Amino acid sequence: MVDLRKLADLATLSEPGALCSLMVVRWNYLPRTEVTMFLRTIFLSKLLGLYCIILALAMLVNGTVIMQDVTELAHNAPVMFIAGIFTLFAGLAMVLGHNYWRGGAVTIVVTLIGWLTLLKAVLILFIPLYVATLLPLALLQSHHFFYVRLVVTLLLGVYLTYSGFATSAKTQQPV
């Protein structure tokens, strides 16, 4: 790997474009896995963030209807099985595509969401329906828990969306 300090010593920053060339060299010599992971983190941060914001706003507008629908769906075994399959697919895709525990907080949050999604899918598929619905339904029917979940989902969405788009804007600025 190229030592960036040696490159910085070689580049005289008084020359026009020397700093730009140094930044391009630095980007080009990052290990490909780090660049790929960085781009995946940005993409997943935007995707998950917008998903959380839209979901939180839907919860805010249609709170009572959503609570009733989730309660009814949780008692429907075929629908829960299909939901478990789709959740398993999403969780596996995130874990296999973004299992990266080093980096900033956004990287770790995205990875954690992937693992929690995978865990949720496994629980949906393997825990019997009557056991799985006891605790979650009691929590979902609580208005306090519903609004706590709404606020947490909205804050997570705002954080991820802002982080994804702010990082994306910084990397696309002309140098």
Image (cartoon, grey):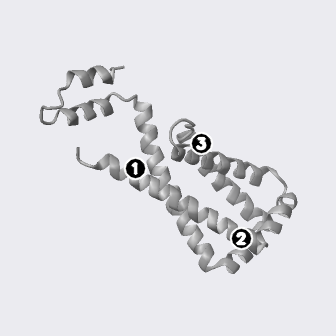
The picture places residue 99, in percent across and down from the top left corner, at 57, 38
> Circle 3 sits on which residue?
95
Mark 3 vs mark 2: in front: 2
Q: Amino acid at mark 1?
A: Thr
Local crowd at mark 2 within 10 Å, few (<14), some, or many (≥20)? Answer: some
**Disc 3 vs disc 2: Cβ atoms closer than 8 Å?**
no
Quarter of image, res 4: top left
The residue closer to the viewer here, 92 or 39, is 39
The picture places residue 58, in percent across and down from the top left corner, at 58, 74
- Inter-mark Cα distance, 1 to 3: 22 Å
The residue closer to the viewer here, 149 or 76, is 149
> Circle 1 sits on which residue?
167
Residue 158 in the image: above or below residue 71:
above
Question: SS at mark 2?
Answer: helix
**Left or right of 10, for residue 73:** right
The picture places residue 61, in percent across and down from the top left corner, at 60, 79
Q: Quadrant of the C terminus?
A: top left
The residue closer to the viewer here, 11 or 74, is 11
> Circle 2 sits on which residue?
146
Question: SS at mark 1?
Answer: helix
**Taking the image as drawn, is residue 47 in sight?**
no
- Inter-mark Cα distance, 3 to 2: 27 Å
**Left or right of 5, for residue 52:** right
**Left or right of 78, for residue 106:** left
The residue closer to the viewer here, 171 or 85, is 171
Local crowd at mark 3 within 10 Å, few (<14), some, or many (≥20)? Answer: some
**Left or right of 21, for residue 130:** right
Question: Residue at coordinates 71% horizontally, 48% vertically from top-left?
Answer: 119
Q: Quadrant of the N terminus?
A: top left
